[in-house]
Image: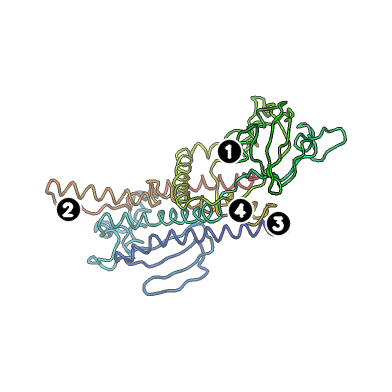
Amino acid sequence: MEVFAFVIGIVLMVVGLAVSIALHELGHLWPAKRFGVRVGQYMIGFGPTLWSRRIGETEYGVKAIPLGGYISMAGMYPPSPKSAERGGRAGGGFFATMVQDARAANDETLDGDDDRRVFYKLPVWKRIVIMLGGPIMNFLFAIVLFAILLSGIGVQTSTTTVQTVNECVIPASAERTTCEASDPAAPAAAAGFEPGDEIVSIDGTPIEIFADASEIIRSSPGDTLSVVVLRDGEEQTLQVVPTTAEREVYDDAGRLVREASGDPVTEEVGFAGIAPSSAYVQQPIWAGPQFAIENVGAVAGVIWQLPVRIYDTATTLFTGEERDPDGPLSVVGVGVLAGEVAAAEAPILNRVAGFLSLLASLNVALFAFNLLPLLPLDGGHVVVALWDGIKRAWAKLFRRPPPKPVDATRLVPVTFVVFIALLVMGGTLILADILNPISLFG
């Protein structure tokens, strides 16, 4: 059953990725058609076509590998120079041939020199709107998902209600979870705590959230604390003396802090032996957009250091070291995490929340990554359009003839290098996600 749930989680993430890609390409398609550009194809995925249907002048379809998508717009670049047409295939080697092939493929989308329904003839702002439409759709989708997660489902928060009371104090070094006769009784059990008690105050300090109670207990080993609880509608006062316990130290990100030798760092704290119940607390409607924006900042930080992070990830393949849980993932890694969420022993609402969080974060990553000013990414096409606009504005300012449109096919060699780099980095992450995966549960 657990394996079945794991597979279901992966399948759902594949579907979620396909939806994200479809929305991304729709973000390009809608403004392109709105501005009159002729669009030949709208495809989700790569490889062999599984299904397609022509509606009007556009063929809509789904391909076998759901790792991307594209729309085919007429005249992404200006027509080939007349000299190139007369000279046939360009000389100069591999890259020159790539440039000529790109021009030839682009020329096939043109309908004569007077064709007005082409991308490169649009005003600069319209070209930018078309290219930014895809990433923006991913960002809007992320906002919707985060809004459902935070304002619809809510954030799981520890309440002031006691869920469980430990019967005994088990030494931290013991590799067991059940009590033995030699174990001392837990302070909360000895004080008379019962599941369902709602903590009202401790030593006169009102308790709003369980973290308040936990902080007082942890800082008061050996002290007698007067705890007021609400039980069956009536307040009762219990006297509890937290015992001293050795516990491992975790940082703000929830990661175990270790010594230089690798041993866990521990500290002595007060321990009573109670655990809180939890409930979903719905957040304000603006929490979704706010969290999405914060997520963009975190993802941008990862992308900024991507080469270094990829190198560190590759190193773990040879050293066997644990990967940075906040490091980059491939779609394989995201799928594995989705499978773990689906197979987790947790209420269905918790698993739904985990899946929505993963899918929303994936869309934030798609948004941020596609804004990189590199061809063939959307950000690269935006830079080309801006450069074209700057050239035109410069010519107009000095009353010179309008310059020729920027021929981005000349950047095909750069595009090829970027593509190879992305392929290598993606392959490294996929290999790491298979051989040394990041796990939600350690």
Give the CA separation, mark 3 to mark 2.
Answer: 64 Å
Q: Quadrant of residue 25?
A: bottom left
Foreground mark, 2 or 4? 4
Mark 4 surroundings within 10 Å by alpha-carbon count, few (fewer than 14), some (14 through 19), many (20 or more): many
Q: Image check: 293 left or right of 244?
A: left
Q: Position of residue 293 (x, y in %)?
A: 44, 46
Q: Which mark is residue 402?
A: 2
Q: Residue at x 40, y 46 (%)?
A: 372
Q: Image check: 373 left or right of 179?
A: left
Q: Which mark is residue 112?
A: none
Q: Residue at x 46, y 60 (%)?
A: 69
For the N terminus, give its image quadrant. Answer: bottom right
The amino acid marked with disc number 2 is Pro
Q: Check the image and name the residue furthest to the left.
A: 399
The amino acid marked with disc number 1 is Asp
Mark 4 lies on a secondary structure that is: helix
Q: Which residue is mark 4?
A: 338
Evaluate if marks 4 and 3 touch, with contact meaning CB atoms under 8 Å apart.
Answer: no
Mark 2 lies on a secondary structure that is: loop
Foreground mark, 3 or 2? 3
Relative depth, front residue between 223 and 28: 223
Relative depth, front residue between 109 and 264: 264
Evaluate if marks 1 and 2 touch, with contact meaning CB atoms under 8 Å apart.
Answer: no
Mark 3 surroundings within 10 Å by alpha-carbon count, few (fewer than 14), some (14 through 19), many (20 or more): few
Foreground mark, 1 or 2? 1
Mark 1 lies on a secondary structure that is: loop
Q: Earlier in the sequence, mark 3 or mark 1?
A: 3
Q: Which residue is mark 1?
A: 324
Q: Earlier in the sequence, mark 3 or mark 2?
A: 3
Q: Earlier in the sequence, mark 4 or mark 3?
A: 3
Give the CA separation, mark 3 to mark 1.
Answer: 26 Å
For the C terminus, give its image quadrant. Answer: top right
